[in-house]
Amino acid sequence: MEFGDEIVWHLTEQEEQEYDGLPALHWAAREGNDQLVAELLAAPGADVGEIFLDWNALHYAATRGHDKVVAQLLEAKADLIDCGWNPLHMAALNNHEKVVTRLLAARPELVDGVDGEGWNSLHFAARGGNQHVVAILLATKPSLMYEVNSFGSKPLRVAADWGHDHIVAQLLAFCPRAIDDGDSALLGATYGGHIKVVTHLLTTKPSLAAAVEPECGSTALHIAAARGDEDIVDMLLSCKPMLIYALDHPGNTILHEAIRGHPVGNKFCGANLIERLWRLNTDALWTLNTDSLTPFQLAITKGREFAIDMFQWKLSWDDIVSAFTTCRPPRRSPLSFVERYRPLIAQQCEGLLEAITKDLMGIVFEFLGLTQQAH
């Protein structure tokens, strides 16, 4: 019987169900069983650096925040393998202040480590949201704040993405000039609908309201309108009213995006906010994007019935007929969607026929009148 098998034999039935096939030392480290860890480390042939699925026992202990076990493994000279996330990353992400302090004291070089996507320990701490861990890392290496991961994000953007307004405030207090790069953070907070972060950033620097995504040209207002975040929309417009006229790279107005909706979380703008946005820029209703779609036509293609109902009274009948003629509702829309608007089209087509008939009769009467005068 192998060494690991002997340990498994001593587990309770519940412990064995949670065992997950881990080597004994990994399992004991994950569970924080310092007595078992000590026995395993003292046993002949024990391998403190054994790797299982790219992690050694130190990773598991750091992830769960088992400070005593981390101390045992460090004393046993556990290897700090480079598998992407090092133990400091795991402790910072999971808000284990004591473990972070112990790891940095024993292996200061850990603070320089980044994972495969360029995340440093402060990126992970910003995502975790623990102010004490953030403070420890900033005191150890202040330049962590300015390092960029492979997505182009600094720790401030990560904190904004996850809605940690207290971490955003902490980072800006540590280095006030970091607000100069606040555009990215504002966009991230708007994407997530984190009103507290947006409020803090715009209060600190109102001009951030003009932030634009470099790739697609969307402003924060495009994003907030698509999500239907009325409070963020109001805040952005109060800082920069002219944003209502902004176009992104594909030529979408704010009204286009409000009707389109936000794909993440199935977010959509409500009818009241859409009408407000239209009243702030009535010309947007006739603006074509690069797909040659007006907001009304986009409403048809997306099946946004409330927007169709709202705007059909604000368009001429030929605009409505043209829109329904050139645009198709989404494939998954129920037949009732098409049937609902069939009378509208029939009514408009009847109006067209009636108008043509009146025009023709006018010409005939005019001709007859002229003919009678000639005779």
Image (tube, rainbow, N blue to C red):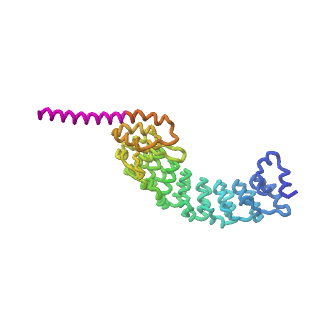
Q: Seen in the image, is 372 located left or right of residue 26?
A: left
Q: Position of residue 11 (x, y in %)?
A: 83, 49
Q: Main secondary structure of the magenta part?
A: helix
Report the side of 355 relative to 275 (left or right).
left
The part of the image, by quadrant, that contains residue 121 is bottom right
Q: Quadrant of the N terminus?
A: bottom right
Q: In the displayed image of the protein, which residue is found farthest to the bottom?
A: 109
**Residue 48 forms part of the magenta stretch:** no
Residue 330 locus on image (x, y percent): 49, 42
Front one among 187 and 36: 187
Residue drawn at x 29%, y 36% is 356
Depth order, front residue of 240/311? 311
**Coordinates of residue 217 in the picture (x, y in percent):** 44, 56
Q: Residue at x 62, y 57 (%)?
A: 133
Tell me the quadrant of the picture where the C terminus can be found: top left
- Magenta residues span 347-375
- Relative to 333, does residue 144 appear above or below in the rendering? below
Residue at the right extreme of this rendering: 1
The number of numbered badges drawn on the structure is: 0
Give yes or no for residue 364 being in the magenta stretch: yes
Q: Is residue 222 left or right of residue 315?
A: right
- Residue 338 vertical placement versus 18 (above, below): above
In the rendered structure, the answer to whether residue 83 lies left or right of residue 308 reads right
> Residue at image x 85%, y 51%?
9
Residue 347, position as x, y percentages in the image: 37, 33
Q: Residue furthest front?
A: 375
**Residue at the image point whose x is 75% and y is 57% from the top:** 69
